[in-house]
Image (spheres, rainbow, N blue to C red):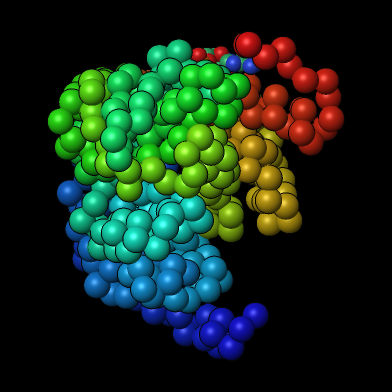
């Protein structure tokens, strides 16, 4: 621990963050994906976080951050979780893009990209999945062909959350067809307003349009959109997926506890069968919270959290009875929850990863 994050400094900082939670522009927490109804509020909130000097806490000052420690960032996330306030504009920009650029970007890319993430002026989306490349992401076929100083991109992406509002996107494209499939992929930071990009929102069963199909036809990318070395995009992308699956930590434990408390409240007066199911869910929640405080295991965190949340919502619906079938917040949350078991890599795929890499089980057959 440095003098910057001594206990007294961190508790003074925590008090300052708690004050910020009362700000009239504070946006309610929306989870992993920014919902369209909160788009304007979340943008204004990110601008406010920046004005308050609370954006990019552990990012270097020269890129718009506050130059503080990861411990300060953890305090921010914990207090947001406690207050039910969104910690940022969106996961795809503030965590996935921001951390990838910090790790793999040139100094010029860091100066160009990071400040506009922090002040809320740029919204980012993630252009990884394709119609034939989701779980088998390395099978992607969108191509980026070298052309002069830059690249020409052709292909289609799908399930791109927030793409219809996004200013920029992180894109995976194949830059060498002759290499084995995990190689020959490169990682780009692209302008979503480039000519040749067509975005079509998809309607979900909640009625919202959170994600989109993105079609790219002869899109010209300047050379400085390449993040990391040419043909080394798989490595950059795997680090991004680690951030996406592991974005939980102590703050996640606090949110989980809030959810469990709400569930316990909802369970008051429920019949013995539901109370039994509730007790079992609360046991799972406590075990997950304890595990996450001890070990960092992105796949386990993602799998256990999203399975628990889906089961908890199903029980909440059972306790609410017919009320859960009426249009409203609970019905929306119940319809939304199954998607979280798929986004960022499905539960089955997380089980495969845990089986192979943690438990040492034989490898699953590969699609190719
Ligand atoms: C709400 C939501 C938001 C999303 N946002 C984004 C985004 O912003 N950007 C982006 O790029 N993508 C996004 N995605 C896409 C997501 O990453 C993919 O949906 C996911 O990786 C699964 O891919 P798929 O849909 O192609 O399903 P498939 O890979 O076709 O899988 C279909 C089924 O087969 C199972 N399966 C596949 N392979 C195996 C295997 N080897 N072993 C066992 N079972 C297997 C899967 O678990 C699944 O049940 C989002 C998805 C959702 C639901």
Between 250 and 104, the one lying in front of the other is 104
Instruction: Give how far across and how far down residue 77 sits, in percent.
Output: 47, 61
- Which image quarter: residue 334? top left
**Is residue 21 depicted above or below 253 in this figure?**
below
Would residue 337 be visible to someone looking at this image? no
Would residue 229 be visible to someone looking at this image? yes
**Is residue 246 depicted above or below 278 in this figure?**
below
**Is residue 183 depicted above or below 67 in this figure?**
above
**Is residue 287 depicted above or below 73 in this figure?**
above
Give me the residue at 68% from left, 56% from top. Answer: 293
Name the side, left or right, on which 257 lies relative to 122. Answer: right
Name the quarter where the C terminus is drawn. Answer: top right
The image shows a total of numbered marks equal to 0
Name the quarter where the N terminus is drawn. Answer: bottom right
- Which image quarter: residue 105? bottom left
Name the side, left or right, on which 287 lies relative to 16. Answer: right
Name the side, left or right, on which 180 lies relative to 338. Answer: right
Instruction: Give how far across and how far down residue 33 sits, in percent.
Output: 37, 39
Between 360 and 347, the one lying in front of the other is 360
Give me the residue at 23% from left, 28% from top. Answer: 219
Name the side, left or right, on which 232 lies relative to 129. Answer: right
Instruction: Give how far across and how far down residue 75 sits, in percent.
Output: 50, 69
Instruction: Give how far across and how far down residue 183 sits, in percent.
Output: 57, 29
């Amino acid at each position: 621990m440095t003098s910057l994050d001594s206990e007294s400094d961190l508790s003074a900082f925590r008090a300052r963050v708690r004050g910020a939670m009362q700000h009239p522009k504070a946006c309610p927490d929306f989870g992993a994906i920014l919902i369209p109804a909160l788009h304007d509020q979340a943008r204004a909130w990110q601008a406010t976080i920046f004005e308050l000097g609370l954006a990019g806490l552990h990012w270097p000052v020269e890129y718009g951050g506050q130059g503080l420690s990861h411990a300060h960032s953890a305090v921010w996330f914990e207090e947001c979780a406690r207050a039910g306030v969104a910690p940022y504009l969106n996961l795809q920009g503030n965590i996935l893009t921001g951390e990838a650029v910090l790790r793999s970007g040139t100094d010029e890319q860091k100066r160009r990209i990071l400040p506009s993430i922090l002040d809320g002026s740029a919204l980012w989306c993630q252009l990884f999945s394709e119609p034939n490349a989701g779980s088998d992401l390395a099978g992607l076929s969108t191509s980026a062909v070298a052309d002069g100083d830059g690249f020409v991109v052709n292909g289609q992406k799908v399930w791109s959350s927030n793409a219809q509002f996004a200013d920029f996107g992180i894109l995976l494209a194949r830059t060498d067809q002759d290499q084995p499939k995990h190689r020959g992929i490169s990682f780009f930071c692209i302008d979503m307003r480039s000519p040749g990009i067509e975005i079509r929102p998809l309607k979900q069963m909640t009625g919202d349009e959170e994600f989109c199909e993105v079609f790219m036809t002869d899109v010209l990318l300047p050379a400085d959109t390449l993040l990391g070395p040419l043909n080394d995009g798989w490595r950059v992308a795997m680090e991004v997926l680690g951030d996406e699956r592991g974005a939980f930590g102590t703050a996640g434990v606090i949110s989980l506890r809030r959810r469990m408390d709400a569930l316990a409240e909802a369970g008051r007066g429920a019949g013995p069968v539901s109370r039994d199911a509730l007790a079992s869910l609360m046991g799972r929640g406590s075990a997950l919270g304890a595990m996450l405080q001890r070990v960092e295991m992105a796949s386990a965190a993602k799998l256990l959290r999203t399975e628990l949340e889906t089961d908890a919502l199903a029980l909440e619906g059972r306790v609410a009875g017919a009320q859960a079938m009426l249009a409203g917040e609970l019905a929306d949350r119940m319809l939304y929850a199954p998607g979280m078991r798929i986004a960022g890599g499905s539960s089955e795929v997380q089980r495969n990863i845990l089986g192979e890499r943690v438990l040492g089980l034989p490898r699953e057959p590969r699609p190719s």
